[in-house]
Image (cartoon, rainbow, N blue to C red):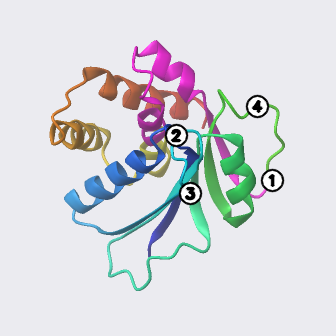
């Protein structure tokens, strides 16, 4: 059975990159994957999201109707997608931005202050990686070390090496663990 994931937020928060990283590492782990991006024409500051399906079996359709996991980097993402999360599913929410909001009672909420995590790691563009850390900790779909290496490999393939990326990822894992 496929795991249906939506990653959503503002353009510039690394939403599509987070989805690409998740998709690539899933393929590296031998899983079947689909990744469909969606973003406004204004990009940075506009809305962006991507739909990801991960499965051990063949995926018949790339479309995500019922969401198992919502990775929400801002309040607009919560507003747009919370209603599509399956009962029993969960949302990983950037609690640095989404504060004081009432959530559905039939889904699990994992608040992670990823903006502060990225600042603490001296990696202001690493909030998306902290969200992926929370995702890996919550779902247990991947070993943490395997996923962290996958992040490093993803960026090394683009000629970018930043040890703070792994720091953001592991801080996201730790904060998710604390909030469970």
The quarter of the image holding the C terminus is: top right
Q: Earlier in the sequence, mark 1 or mark 3?
A: 3
Q: What residue is drawn where x is 27% and y is 56%?
A: 24
* Quadrant showing the N terminus: bottom left
What's the magenta region?
A: 105-133
- In magenta stretch: residue 110: yes
Indicate which disc residue 44 carries. 2
Residue 99 - label = 4
Which is more toward the observer, 83 or 171?
83
Residue 136 image offset from top left, x and y in percent = 42, 45
Vertical order, 54 against 132 (above or below): below
Q: Mark 1 or mark 4: which comes first in sequence? A: 4
Badge 3 or badge 4: first in the primary sequence: 3
Q: Earlier in the sequence, mark 1 or mark 2?
A: 2
Label 1 SS: loop
Residue 169 location (% of width, % of height): 38, 32
Question: What is the number of the mark on residue 13?
Answer: none
- Give the CA separation, mark 2 to mark 4: 22 Å
Circle 1 sits on which residue?
105
Q: Which mark is residue 69?
A: 3
């Amino acid at each position: 059975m496929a795991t249906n994931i939506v990653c959503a937020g503002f353009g510039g928060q690394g939403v599509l990159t987070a989805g690409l990283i998740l998709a690539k590492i899933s393929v590296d782990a031998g899983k079947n994957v689909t990744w469909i991006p969606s973003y406004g024409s204004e990009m940075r500051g506009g809305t962006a999201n991507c739909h990801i399906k991960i499965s051990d079996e063949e995926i018949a359709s790339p479309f995500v109707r019922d969401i198992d996991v919502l990775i929400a980097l801002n309040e607009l993402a919560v507003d747009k997608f919370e209603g599509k999360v399956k009962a029993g599913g969960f949302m990983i929410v950037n609690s640095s931005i989404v504060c004081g909001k009432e959530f559905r009672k039939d889904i699990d909420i994992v608040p992670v202050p990823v903006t502060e995590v990225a600042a603490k790691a001296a990696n202001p563009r690493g909030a998306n990686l902290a969200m992926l850390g929370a995702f890996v900790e919550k779902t247990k779909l991947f070993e943490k070390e395997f996923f962290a290496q996958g992040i490093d490999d993803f960026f090394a393939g683009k000629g970018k090496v930043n040890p703070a990326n792994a720091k953001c990822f592991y801080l996201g894992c730790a904060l998710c663990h604390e909030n469970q």
